[in-house]
Image: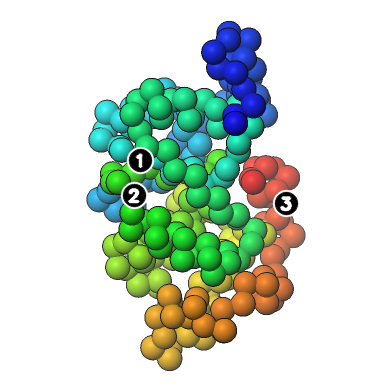
Amino acid sequence: MSGHDLSTRWGRFKAYWSSFWGDHAFLRIGFSNAHWIGPDLVRTAQPWPYQLGYWKRDGIKTVINLRGGVGAGFYALEREACERLGLTFEDFIITSREVPSRDRVLGAKALFERVEYPALMHCKSGADRAGIMSVFYRHFHLGHPIREAVKELGLRTLHVKQGKTGVLDYMFERYLAEAEPQGISFIDWVNSDAYDPKGIKADFRDNWWGTLLTDRLLRRE
């Protein structure tokens, strides 16, 4: 399962060590990049176990992990903390440099329809994958138009659209330019033949400095 035996001191030490250094958790001790994006969902960076305790006291019932990580120290610690605190743990993997497949978009819609709220949703930095899922949450759960919801992808939450992660913005830009003017809803566009994730990605162009910032300096997943 997790790859880390938390029942032993050595196993727990290795989990914290790999999380602290390998996953850059030291950067998130005093900064969680947390933002409430609606009355019942908050987006954050990867939480420490003790931070999940704080969110539990704030009423959070469900934790949604967007990054996967089975076998990693951070994953083992997070799952254990959720079990100990009585929080429902959900895995929903989405990528930051790919246009999501039709199944992923429909899966996100179904996720927000079934989870128990209030919920916390996170990726590693709380910027890119949490960003696109925040757009989906606001559109599918709160009913906000894509033109408004897409503001969740921005510098306010440290998302850099000029790098490879800007392909997430570009997907919505294509919808707003090609389908919205024709009165086509976002979900109908996704379900149509016009929605071509591979083609959309092929048309996207990132800026070298944006990719340098996100991939080399910030080391975004």
Q: Are marks 2 and 1 in contact (CB under 8 Å)?
A: yes
Q: Is residue 38 visible?
A: yes
**Helix, strand or loop status at disc 1:** strand
**Which of 93 and 120 lies nearest the eye of the viewer?**
93
* Residue that mark 2 sits on: 115
Looking at the rendering, which quadrant does residue 1 occupy? top right
Q: Nearer the viewer, residue 196 or 36?
A: 196
**Mark 1 lies on residue:** 62
Q: Residue at x 70, y 55 (%)?
A: 211
SS type, badge 2: loop
Crowdedness near tag 2: few (<14), some (14–19) or many (≥20) residues, C-alpha within 10 Å: some
Question: Of discs 1 and 3, which sits in the foreground?
Answer: 1
Left or right: 40, with 181 as reference point: left
Kind of residue sitting beneath label 1: Thr
Dot 3, crowdedness within 10 Å: few (<14), some or many (≥20)?
some
Taking the view exactly as shown, the residue that stands out farthest to the front is 1
Q: Is residue 194 left or right of residue 176?
A: right
